[in-house]
Image: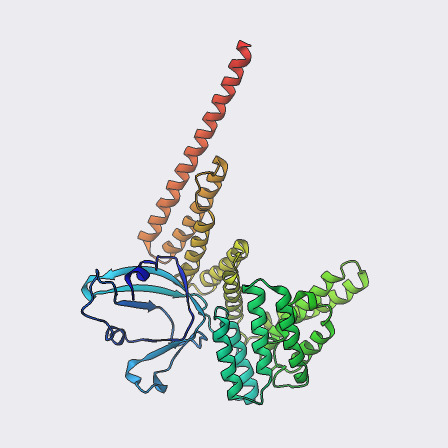
């Protein structure tokens, strides 16, 4: 890898892979590809990327494929394209003659639903797998997306609904990445037109994570397709095979009725009608989450917040308030319910990075703005210090506490300066008045 590219991998940089890549759980396998002739001053550099993952997870971003490989001793782990990583650390290891780049995989959450099951037909399993893949491939360039979907269509030529998924995904790209909502709506209409042929197909209308999403994404068409959307949703509700599917359908039925309330806010009759429906499905959703013992309430909540956090991070203009709420809820689950302080620290550090980014001190900041920014940063340091302390990482806790105290001293100094300036200004004004 060119040294200039390595130097661009600064800490806290976000990167993404636009093609599949192979890795190994055996570090020695990675070192086999190292060129001993290179050194720290060479144009090209040996680079080892270290990604911390849990291979026991059924995670969509990666899979341990050593049992299916021609070279099982390589312990190959294959990463799917289209995922985001955060660079945590970059340093040159003299003893081993390579750069070590530590990466954090951002959307590494474990699906809680059974996406493939012996109870499902092959078509239902195929649909669920493609649904999951569609969600994961947000950052993949359109050209490569088309290649993937064309391969699916070649493998399953009788499943024309895959074309609807492809067109819907392109609509998402136009709406969210290219900011062209009008063109996106055209694609959503086209996808729904194809999907009309499968209205009565129980294998495909088992959940609402493919073309039903088009109705939510294209807000201008919700009123026009309200009846059609309800047909799909209610059919899916009567056709669920797992508690996960049922909760997902209840949530979306709640949302579509709530949206209708917004559209008809001046009509009391419609407001009451749609409001009662929204309450009905929200109540069922809550009952499943809270009262169904086999259903892992904490896992549901954790995955929901992680999904929401990933979506917020993908937006060009990130909603800092929503990101903070998601992270706070995830941290609360890890701290209060799971007593997993190590995992809580990962998310608290992510929140801290956002705080630093949003409160960067500028030369033209007035005194009040500076005080507010320093107060927020100091509070963030203290939150991190508290978690490090609970995880018995006392040196890191002390370091963040010192930084918080230093910011407090700066803040007090700024306040004193402001107060003195104000007093001086008042004395000057009184003096001028007296002489006058």
Above or below residue 13? Residue 160 is below
**Residue 303 position within the rendered picture, expressed as x and y whole percent measured from the top left:** 51, 68
Comparing 126 with 406, the one in front is 126
Q: Where, quadrant-wise, is the C terminus in this rendering?
A: top right
268 or 135, which is in the foreground? 135
The colour scheme applied to this rendered structure is rainbow
Could one spot residue 90 in this view of the protein? yes
Residue 114 showing in the rendered view: no
Question: How many numbered discs sit on the rendered protein?
Answer: 0
Instruction: Tell me which residue sits at (58%, 81%) in the image.
Output: 163
Q: Which residue is drawn at 41% across and 56% down?
A: 349
Instruction: Answer with the quarter of the image where residue 342 lies.
Output: bottom left
Between 317 and 432, which is closer to the camera in this rendering?
317
Q: In this view, does 246 lie to the left or right of 109?
A: right
Q: Position of residue 171 (x, y in %)?
A: 59, 70
Residue in front for this viewpoint, 66 or 407: 66
Q: Pick the quarter of the image with the N terminus.
A: bottom left
Q: Position of residue 387 (x, y in %)?
A: 40, 55
Q: In which quarter of the image is residue 167?
A: bottom right
Task: Tell me which corner region of the image, top left, top right, bottom left or bottom right, holds residue 82.
Answer: bottom left
Q: Is residue 38 above or below residue 144?
A: above
Vertical comparison of 278 with 430: above or below: below
Expressed as whole percent of the image width and height from the top left, the position of residue 265 reads: 76, 59
Residue at 59 percent of width and 65 percent of height: 175
């Amino acid at each position: 890898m060119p040294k200039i590219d390595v130097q661009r991998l600064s800490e806290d940089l976000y990167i993404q892979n636009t093609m599949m890549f192979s890795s190994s759980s055996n570090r020695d396998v990675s070192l086999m590809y190292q060129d001993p002739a290179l050194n720290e001053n060479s144009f090209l550099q040996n680079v080892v990327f270290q990604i911390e993952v849990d291979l026991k997870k059924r995670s969509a971003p990666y899979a341990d494929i050593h049992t299916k490989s021609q070279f099982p001793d390589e312990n190959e782990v294959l990463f799917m394209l289209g995922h985001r990583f955060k660079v945590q650390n970059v340093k040159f290891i003299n003893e081993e003659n390579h750069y070590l780049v530590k990466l954090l995989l951002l959307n590494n959450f474990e699906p809680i639903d059974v996406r493939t099951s012996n109870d499902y037909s092959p078509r239902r399993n195929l649909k669920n797998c493609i649904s999951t893949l569609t969600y994961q491939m947000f950052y993949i360039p359109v050209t490569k997306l088309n290649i993937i979907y064309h391969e699916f269509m070649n493998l399953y030529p009788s499943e024309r609904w895959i074309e609807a998924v492809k067109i819907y995904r392109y609509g998402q790209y136009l709406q969210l990445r290219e900011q062209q909502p009008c063109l996106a709506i055209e694609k959503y209409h086209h996808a729904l037109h194809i999907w009309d042929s499968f209205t009565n197909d129980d294998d495909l209308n088992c959940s609402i994570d493919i073309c039903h999403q088009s109705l939510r994404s294209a807000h201008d068409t919700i009123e026009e397709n309200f009846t059609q959307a309800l047909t799909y949703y209610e059919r899916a509700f009567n056709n669920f095979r797992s508690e996960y599917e049922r909760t997902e359908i209840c949530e979306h039925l709640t949302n579509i009725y709530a949206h209708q309330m917004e559209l008809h806010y001046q009509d009391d009759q419609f407001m009451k009608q749609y409001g009662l429906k929204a309450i009905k499905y929200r109540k069922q959703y809550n009952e499943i989450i809270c009262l169904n013992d086999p259903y892992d309430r904490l896992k549901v909540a954790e995955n929901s917040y992680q999904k929401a956090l990933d979506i917020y991070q993908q937006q060009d203009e990130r909603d800092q308030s929503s990101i903070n709420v998601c992270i706070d809820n995830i941290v609360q689950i890890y701290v209060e319910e799971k007593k997993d302080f190590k995992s809580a620290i990962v998310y608290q550090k992510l929140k801290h990075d956002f705080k630093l980014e949003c409160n960067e001190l500028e030369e033209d900041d007035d005194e009040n703005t500076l005080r507010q920014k320093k107060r927020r940063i100091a509070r963030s340091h203290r939150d991190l210090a508290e978690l490090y302390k609970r995880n018995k990482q006392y040196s890191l806790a002390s370091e963040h506490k010192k930084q918080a105290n230093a910011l407090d001293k700066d803040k007090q100094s700024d306040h004193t300066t402001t107060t003195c300036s104000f007093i001086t200004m008042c004395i000057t004004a009184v003096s001028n008045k007296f002489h006058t």
